[in-house]
Amino acid sequence: MDSLRALTAADETLDPADWADAEALSHRILDDAITYLRDVRERPVWREMPAEVRSFFKTPLPRSPAPVAEVYDDVARNVMPYPMGNIHPRFWSWYMGASNLTGALGDFLAAIQGSNLAGGNHAAGLMDGQVVNWMKEMVGFPASASGTLVSGGSMANIIGLTVARNVKAGVDVRERGVGAMPKPLLYYASDQVHSCHRKGMEALGLGNRALRRIPTDAALRIDSSALKAAIAEDREAGFKPACVIGTAGTVNTGAVDDLQVLAKVAAEEDLWFHVDGCIGALIAIAPENRSLVAGIEQADSIALDPHKWLHAPFEAGCALVRDPSAHRNTFAVTPEYLESTPRGLASGAWLHDYGLQTSRGFRALKIWMALKEHGVEKFGRLIDQNIAQARYLTGVIEAEPALELMAPTTINIVSFRHRLDDGSEEGLKAFNTEIMLRLQEEGIAALSDTTVHGRHCLRVAIANHRTRRDDLDLLVREMLRLGREIKAAAPPM
C-alpha cells in the first residue's frame, strides 16, 4: 500500500498546480480579450513584424517548464499585436468574416469540454446535428437532407464533389477506384470558379482536365448556352457529364450564377447540381437580397461557410447533401472498434460517417451560441448591410474621375482600380499594387488584387459586421492621396 501511495504521489498532470493562480490569469486573459475587440478600430489593420518578433518564432523547443503567466506574456507581446487583421473593420482583402465575442467564448467552452465530434451519445453531438439542421433551414433545404460541419469552404466543396462522383461513377468507385469507371466523368463550372474545385478534382483522381471551365457573360455568370453546348459535345465524344457547379458569389467579383437555370439544365441533362455557396449561400437569409440566390434550394449539394457571414471564429464550414443515403454511403466505414451499441456512449450517431475526418472538433458551439444570442434575422440584416455598403462604395468610385470600376457589383465585392494617365496595363498594375501595399503598410486598410477580363484591379470584399460607410469614404480619400504621392515621386518618363 505504501508503494502504491508513493507511485500515486509521483503521477503527473497538466492541470494547474495552483487553481487560484490559474483563475486569476484566466480573468486577466479574458479582460485583455474584451479590450482587444473593443479597441480594434484604434489599431492598425495590419503591420509588419519587426525583426525581434520574427526571431522569437525561431526559439528552440522548450524542454523545461515556464510559468504560464510568462507564456501568456509572450503571446501578448509577439502574437496579439500582429494579426492577419480580418476582425478589423477595414479588412477587405479576402472574404473571411470578422468573428464575434460570443463565438470566441463558445470556442473556449468547446475546448474546455474537449469533446471529439466523431460522434456518439453526448450533448455536443446533438448540438452538431442541430446546427446542421439550422443551416438546412437557412438555405431552404428539406429537413430530410444530410449535412456535416467541416473546416471551411474548400472541404465543404470537396464533400459535395465526392458524393457527386460516387453517385455518377457507374461503378462502386469506393471499392474499385476511378480506373474502373466505364466513362470518364466531367464536371462543369464557370471560368470564375474557385481554385478549391481544381484541388478537389485532383484529389478525387479525376484530374484538372475533368473540370470544364465554361465562359461567362458580361456579368461574369456562367453562360448557360455555352454550358449546354459543352455537355452535348462531351457526351458525343464519349465522356460522361456528371456534375454542374453553380457559384453563388464568385471570389473575384461576387457574381452569382443563375441557379434556377442551372437547376433546370442539371435536371434535363441528368447531372448532379452542386452549389458553391461559400461566399453567397447565406444571402438566402437576407431579406432585401435573398432573390439573388433563388434556386439554391434545388441543389443536390451545397457548400457554405459559417465563418464568413455568420462570423463564427475560424474554422467553420458546412456541406449539405439532399440525399442522406448518398452522403453516408460515400464516406461511412464501420471498423470493429467503432460499432454502435444499443445503449451507452456508442449508441449515438457516428458523425464521421459523413466526411473525411474521424477526429472532429466541436465546431457547432460557437455557431450555436452566436445564433441564439442575435437570432438569424440580425445576421440577415448584416448581410444586407454589407451589400448596401458595397453598392455605396461603387457609387463613390463611379463618381470619382480618378477611379475606375472594373466589374459589376452584384453583392459585396467591388473590383476597381486607380486610373493612370497614359498608363499601360503593366504600369497600371504596378501603380495600383503600390497603392495596395502602402495602404497595408500604413495600417489604413487591407485590400487584395486580382485580374478581371485580363486586366489587373484591386478588390474590396466587405464581409465585416464592424465596417461603416465612413470607413469606405476613408479608403477612397487615402487611395487618392497615395495615388498623388506615388505619381509625384515617380521619375519623369
Image (cartoon, rainbow, N blue to C red):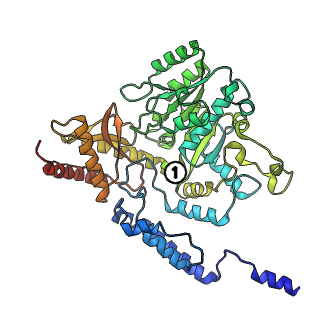
Quadrant in which the C terminus is drawn = top left
Q: Which residue is mark 1?
A: 307
In the displayed structure, 237 sits above or below 164; it is above
- How many residues crowd mark 1 within 10 Å: few (<14), some (14–19), many (20+)? many
> Does 401 sit left or right of 82 as displayed?
left
Q: Which residue is the extreme one toward the top?
A: 236
| Res 145 quadrant in image | top right
Vertically, is 129 above or below 248? below
Q: Position of residue 165 (x, y in %)?
A: 64, 30
* Residue at left offset 77%, top offset 83%: 9
Relative to 425, is 76 on the left or the right?
right
Query: What residue sits 67% from the left and 74% below the top?
Result: 14
Residue ranking furthest to the front:
60
Q: Amino acid at mark 1?
A: His
The answer to whether 50 appears left or right of 295 in the picture is left
Report if residue 396 is visible in the image: no
For the point 60% across and 34% down, the residue is: 161
At mark 1, the secondary structure is helix
Give the image location of residue 432, x and y in percent.
Answer: 26, 44
